Amino acid sequence: MSKEKKSFSRRKFLQRGVIVLGGSVVASYLGCSPMRRFTAQKVESMDLPASISSLKPDFWFEILADNTILLKSPKIEMGQGVWTGLAMMAAEELEVSLDKIKVEHANTGSGLIDNVNTGGSSSTSSLYGPVREVAATMREMLKAAAAKQWNVSISAVKTENGTLSSGGKKATYGEIVASTKEWDEPKTPTLKPKSAFKIIGKEVKRVDLKPKVMGTAKYTLDSELPDMLYAVLVKSPYLDATIKSVDSNEATKSAGVVKIVREGNLLAVVAKSFYAADSAAKKVVVEWNTPNKTQQADLIKLVTVGNGKEANIQKEGSAKSILKDNKTEVFRQEYRTPMATHAQMEVNGAIAHVEANKVLIITGSQGPSQVRDVVAKAIDIKKDTIDVHTPLLGGGFGRKAAPGLAAEAAIISKIVGKPIKVYNSRQHEFQNGVYRPNTHHVLQAKMTKDSKIEAITHDQATPDMYVRNMVGEIGLKLLGSDFLSAGHGASLMYNVPNKSVSVWNTDVPIPISIWRAVGMFPNTFAIESFINELAHKAGKDAIDFRLDMLTDKDDKIIERSRKVLETLIEKSGWETPKADGVGRGIAIGNDRKSIAAAAIEVEIIEGKIKVKKVTNVLDMGQIINPEGIKAQIEGCVMMGISATLYEELTVKDGQIEQAYFSQYPLASLSDVPEILSFLLEGDDVPYGVGEPPLSPIAPAIVGAVLNLTGKALRSLPLRLS
Amino acid sequence: MKIDFKLNGKPTSIDVDPAMPLLWVVRDELKLTATKFGCGMAMCGACTLHIDGEAIRSCSVPVESIAGKNIITLEGLSESEANLHPIQQAWMEEQVPQCGYCQSGFMMAAAKLIKENPNPTDDDIKNGITNICRCGTHPRIIKAIKRAAEINNQNH
């Protein structure tokens, strides 16, 4: 085995009592150079492995003397099960049972966390190589250390269930760690082949299951600091409102109030308890300037194809001229999706303790390193003095990729001089949030005489959800359009000779953000609804119609898509007779190489669409945690039903009109259909699972309604009349 | 105002504003954080706990109204970790939680449901619990409640 000698400092190593080994995922994101690996050598302090941050690890392991392994995760657990997936990958190569691995969030003070947000269904795929490689490296280091102690060859040392053995010699990982002075690090350990997997792909219990069932799991709102005060923000229900005047006389006299803080347009009541702060906040009288006068009609008009900057993102053949030359034969339809909110169950909140040269932030965020940037700017302090701790997230869905309340908490803490806990009311979440923007789509096609698509175009209008928030990414801004987020999924996957897709980028006077599945959600709704309509018009079976356009045998995505649809036919009973009053629809999407399709059966009961059965087929490549994948599919089905049948935000006079759950109904237990999920491994690396199954739900429901009633619904949420 | 009640079996006394919602008394004064804040308007059910055996949304209950009553939160639902309440056993078996935030409220509502209805059908469950979950754990909640009813019936 080729080796790279690295000496740990004995003294410091024994002080630590752990092996620390980590890696950076940056290389794997860029997909070029091999992963950087490093060992911790300069540990001067005992409390946190902060000294290795100069080497910029994004994740790392520590083997503790009690033989447990701590995995510091660069990815945030918000319910999607990423901790479990990473722990499974690590346990596989380390040859330990899953319960030996303890997962925690890496945090910005004790070692840099991944600079990329947790999102885009990319966590598992981006870390599949790096985590296993570092885990395997650690295993080989332990073997080498044991071999040296026992005076045997490395190949004579076996690892099993956290124990090293050779002949009659036996020691736990923890024992070897405690007794090793010098470490040898192998350069490139061999990774297990798939056939040898004992944990990856097998049924396990998620690692955060028990605390979540026992009620001991800690979220931001459950966290505390000694001597902490509570702040409640006073906000206007109007967008972009600024303070004209404040009368806080009554509020100041309210029980438990410590201070009323006003800093620019930040207005907060600070008190000894949340209840005291909240009660006093209701007594603050504010006059607001409300410059934003946006009406719903303005928003619809702004977000309309033809308005804004056009960027052509897909062009094959000469679709536009064919459509232009054959106007009378063109089938043209328009689709719209509404503005929506994330409505995650845990409101945004943060705890901040600002001291002279030290800032502690506790906040549930999908992007802790961005939280640090925002706080540094808000209170004008150096980034490296800020330690961001991330508890579990009570749901994310993109909402917690946007800055939460860390900056507000820090500003108030700096003024008051004490730790501050602040969180939103549900009304704040609805009316002072960031939103999934509305979209508009125009699809046009010309069919051949034998009912094949000859030419097709998709024009999509939306404000960008991502690029406009990227400071300094001038290159991306110059592209003129956001095909990274809103435009994602706008292009057409089918093998049609002539196709053209344009994204019309416009700005809206509403704060917008990414929402689960991002551009895939509206784009798949529009494209797949249109495909269903074309099939319906041609009198063809909706799956056959698609299979006829998935013909390129050299394209792996196309081949995997065919397999997904063929599996769906079999598993959903697509070709079996339907009961009376039942409509069937399907849709498929390729979301960053995860292929998801759904066949849905609906009924109309008392004038309302009722989803009865959803059959999902997902090809997400290598399966890590099958039960976790199924949970994500079920979640996507429920969120898909919710967004298709119920969810819509509207704006009036510059105010989001929905302020409470009663005004923004979500799918509930009564909406649960029969759900079947089937997984295909069409590739040997894992792709995303948290978002891809969401996109086919809306168009498959629409297709089922079309199948049942002959009526094509083209606007979400669906309304029958 | 001093208010006495039982919390998870223990006699408890608290001296706070009588109008303070029970949710904040449990979370901020008594430091039991399984019971969650979701909306503050009794619309989502994240704050559900038991008052004298009834599943109640504690964000909208002034603490003065619970004097002399028996409050059970999720922390007090099971006798011990070794002897879990059927609802928590079933929640483990079916791996219900995703983000987990709404689950305490759901489990408390579900515990009440199977007590009243030892053999609930899908429709009983769908109509009986109106709590909100955004991760979409609903299908597993229904399975887990039926499983919990089974465990409960075997135990008796």
Image (spheres, coloured by chain):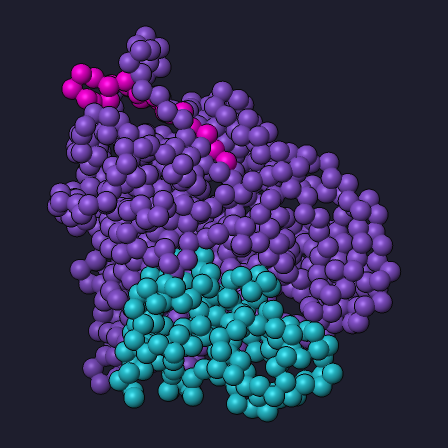
Chain colours: A purple, B cyan
The residue located at (49%, 75%) in the rendering is B55
Give A366 or A503, whichever is nearer the viewer. A503
Which image quadrant: the N terminus of chain A? bottom left
Residue A530: name its quadrant: top left
Residue A26 at x, y percent in the picture: 45, 48
In this rendering, the answer to whether A389 lies above or below A714 is: below
The residue located at (51%, 59%) in the rendering is A345
Main secondary structure along the magenta-highlighted residues: strand
**Does residue A448 belong to the magenta stretch?**
yes
Give the residue at the far top of this rendering.
Answer: A325
In this rendering, the answer to whether B120 lies above or below A681 is: below
Give A656 or A264, whichever is nearer the viewer. A656
In this rendering, the answer to whether A568 lies above or below A492 is: below
**Does residue A172 belong to the magenta stretch?**
no
Q: Which residues are magenta?
A: A438-458
Image check: B132 left or right of A382?
left
The residue located at (70%, 74%) in the rendering is B19
Residue B149 at x, y percent in the picture: 31, 77
Residue A406 at x, y percent in the picture: 65, 56
The residue located at (27%, 40%) in the rendering is A704
Give the residue at the far front of this rendering.
Answer: A606
Which image quadrant: the C terminus of chain A? top left
Residue A226 at x, y percent in the picture: 68, 75
Decide if residue A239 is in sight here: yes
